């Protein structure tokens, strides 16, 4: 049986359950999936701002995730050990791909805009990590070019798809190998969650869906960089 958590389908003004066991997410097999086509409009998405003050964007996990044991390649073509490189640092991890026409660039832009509201020292501590779900096209050079237009400080990682898929699965996030749709466009189906890891424990303890706005991240990041609950 396949179960998907689609919390972004609820009314914008509805409240969200504050805590959620990681074991429940893993047992479900997948979080919200988004099938992204090979966008052709070339437009850069603007950051989404929310005027809904009654909405709770963050889901606090009462059973945090372990940080994935991922060793991939960064945008300079060098080996990047996720656990070692981000140990003791506030870290946000997202799985997506550069050809995504909507969710991926929007999420990264929201994070980039919010990150710039932090003091410089906290910006430098924070690690935002973008892991490609389409490594065949997302070469280190392609990732570097794409992220340069969003925030050059974002860590872009690519590598063997099976390795990436296993790392995502450890966070309860399902990704599937890219396929072609009926029009011949490449589609990558992937979970759209951002997982926040605490600098105190290196555990993933907060989850955001793709409806989180720049306001949400701007409000929460000062606490996340300290390992506090938003």
Image: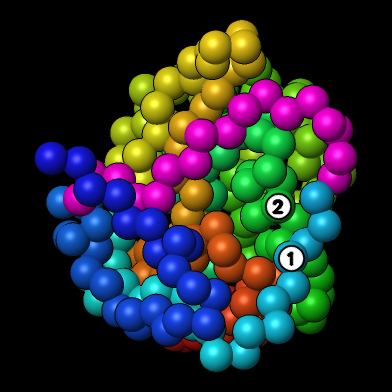
Q: Residue at x 24, y 63 (%)?
A: 22
Above or below residue 69? Residue 36 is above
Is residue 211 visible in the rendered image? The answer is yes
* Residue 101 position within the rendered picture, expressed as x and y whole percent measured from the top left: 70, 36
Above or below residue 192? Residue 57 is below
Q: Nearer the viewer, residue 197 or 36?
A: 36
Q: Is residue 91 magenta?
A: no
Which region is colored magenta? 28-44
Read off the residue under disc 1.
48
Q: CA distance from mark 1 to mark 2?
A: 8 Å
Q: Quadrant of residue 148?
A: top right
Is residue 125 visible in the rendered image? The answer is no
Q: Quadrant of residue 110?
A: bottom right
* Residue 5 position within the rendered picture, expressed as x and y whole percent measured from the top left: 32, 56
**Of helix, strand and loop, which one carries label 1?**
loop
- Local packing at callout 1 (Cα closer than 10 Å; few below 14, some 14-19, many 20+) is some
Q: Is residue 135 left or right of residue 118?
A: left
Q: Quadrant of the N terminus?
A: top left
Read off the residue under disc 2.
106
Q: Are the residues flagged by discs 1 and 2 in contact, CB closer than 8 Å?
A: yes
Q: Residue at x 55, y 58 (%)?
A: 210
**Of helix, strand and loop, which one carries label 2?**
helix
Q: Residue at x 69, y 62 (%)?
A: 111
Q: Quadrant of residue 123?
A: bottom right
Q: Is residue 168 left or right of residue 212?
A: left
Above or below residue 194? Residue 73 is above
Q: Is residue 31 magenta?
A: yes
* Residue 97 position within the rendered picture, expressed as x and y whole percent measured from the top left: 61, 33
* Residue 228 position within the rendered picture, expressed as x and y whole percent measured from the top left: 47, 85
Q: Is residue 14 left or right of residue 29?
A: right
Q: Nearer the viewer, residue 127 or 58?
A: 58
């Amino acid at each position: 049986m396949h179960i998907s958590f689609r919390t972004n389908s609820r009314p914008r003004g509805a409240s969200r359950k504050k805590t959620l066991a990681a074991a429940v997410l893993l047992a479900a097999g997948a979080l919200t999936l988004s099938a992204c086509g090979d966008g052709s409009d070339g437009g850069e998405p603007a950051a989404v701002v929310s005027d809904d003050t009654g909405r709770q964007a963050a889901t606090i996990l009462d059973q945090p995730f372990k940080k994935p044991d991922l060793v991939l390649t960064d945008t300079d073509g060098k080996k990047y050990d996720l656990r070692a490189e981000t140990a003791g640092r506030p870290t946000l991890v997202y799985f997506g791909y550069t050809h995504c026409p909507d969710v991926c660039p929007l999420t990264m832009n929201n994070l980039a805009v919010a990150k710039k509201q932090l003091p410089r020292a906290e910006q430098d501590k924070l690690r935002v990590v973008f892991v490609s779900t389409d490594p065949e096209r997302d070469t280190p050079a392609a990732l570097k070019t794409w992220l340069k237009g969003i925030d050059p400080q974002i860590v872009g990682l690519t590598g063997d798809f099976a390795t990436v898929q296993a790392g995502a699965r450890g966070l309860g996030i399902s990704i599937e190998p890219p396929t072609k749709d009926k029009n011949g466009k490449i589609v990558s189906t992937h979970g759209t969650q951002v997982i926040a890891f605490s600098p105190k424990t290196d555990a993933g303890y907060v989850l955001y869906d793709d409806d989180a706005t720049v306001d949400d991240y701007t409000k929460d990041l000062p606490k996340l960089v300290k390992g506090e609950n938003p």
